């Protein structure tokens, strides 16, 4: 039975990005490959060897993360001290790449041999430099491509108070105007729409 009401039209859903589509599949494949590799190594070298490898990776990863965190905190405190003394802080060469070192340490801490291999690769300084340059170029490119209404536009409008200039009409009602003679609250005004 039709009522003559127009059929509601819904806007087309935006297309899912490739990353959101294939990331769960990639994580599942990674986990299956890690488990398979651990079982192969356990079959060849024994369960205790695999256990010792996993414990050693966890300990090494925690040492790497702790060291990179200390280095980052020291660079931050030196920059704050220089800023308080009126000197412009200068970036030190040793403070670059702490994020990638921490990511490498985190990958070392995760149980698995492939994650350990990728974590060790991230600890190599030339790899860190090339990855950081690539990430910086990609970030700058994405910021230049940002269309209005996206996260990039939000960064550019962060300092604006009301970019659209909308005014909300309203009325201010003070509590002290509605009090009766003994300080009791008076009747509330009627709600009108």
Image (tube, helix red, strand yellow):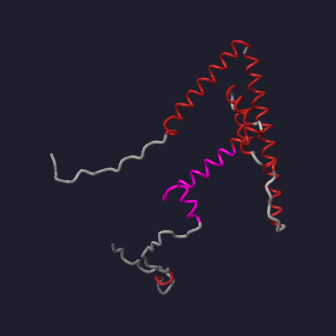
- Coordinates of residue 172 in the picture (x, y in percent): 46, 79
Q: Main secondary structure of the magenta part?
A: helix
Q: Residue at x 63, y 22 (%)?
A: 35
* Depth order, front residue of 65/186: 65
Q: Is residue 128 toward the left or the right of residue 36 in the image?
A: right
Extreme residue in the top direction: 44
> Dividing the picture into quarters, in which one does residue 103 lie?
top right
Height in image: 108 above or below 158? above
Q: Is residue 151 magenta?
A: yes
Residue stretch in magenta? 132-158
Q: Residue at x 69, y 45 (%)?
A: 132
Height in image: 71 above or below 88? above
* Depth order, front residue of 126/10: 126
- Coordinates of residue 133 in the picture (x, y in percent): 69, 46
> Dividing the picture into quarters, in which one does residue 61 lie?
top right
Q: Is residue 161 magenta?
A: no
**Count of numbered badges drawn on the protein:** 0
Q: Quadrant of the C terminus?
A: bottom left
- Coordinates of residue 151 in the picture (x, y in percent): 54, 55
Q: Is residue 191 toward the left or the right of residue 137 in the image?
A: left
Height in image: 35 above or below 157? above
Extreme residue in the bottom direction: 181
Q: Quadrant of the N terminus?
A: top left
Q: Is residue 167 toward the left or the right of residue 106 in the image?
A: left
- Coordinates of residue 152 in the picture (x, y in percent): 55, 56
Q: Residue at x 81, y 66 (%)?
A: 84
Extreme residue in the left direction: 1
Q: Residue at x 57, y 51 (%)?
A: 142
* Depth order, front residue of 42/174: 42
């Amino acid at each position: 039975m039709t009522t003559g009401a127009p059929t509601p039209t819904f806007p087309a859903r935006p297309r899912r990005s490739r990353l959101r589509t294939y990331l769960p599949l990639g994580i599942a494949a990674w986990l299956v490959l890690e488990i398979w590799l651990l079982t192969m190594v356990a079959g060849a070298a024994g369960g205790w060897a695999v256990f010792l490898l996993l414990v050693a990776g966890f300990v090494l990863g925690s040492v790497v993360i702790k060291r990179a965190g200390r280095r980052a905190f020291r660079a931050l405190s030196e920059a704050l001290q220089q800023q308080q003394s009126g000197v412009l802080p200068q970036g030190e060469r040793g403070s670059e790449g702490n994020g990638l070192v921490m990511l490498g340490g985190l990958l070392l801490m995760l149980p698995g041999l492939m994650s350990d291999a990728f974590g060790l690769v991230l600890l190599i300084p030339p790899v860190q430099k090339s990855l950081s340059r690539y990430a910086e170029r990609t970030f700058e490119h994405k910021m230049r491509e940002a269309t209005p209404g996206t996260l990039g536009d939000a960064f550019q409008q962060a300092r604006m108070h009301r970019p659209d200039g909308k005014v909300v009409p309203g009325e201010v009602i003070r509590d002290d105007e509605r009090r009766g003679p003994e300080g009791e609250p008076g009747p509330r005004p009627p709600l009108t729409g």
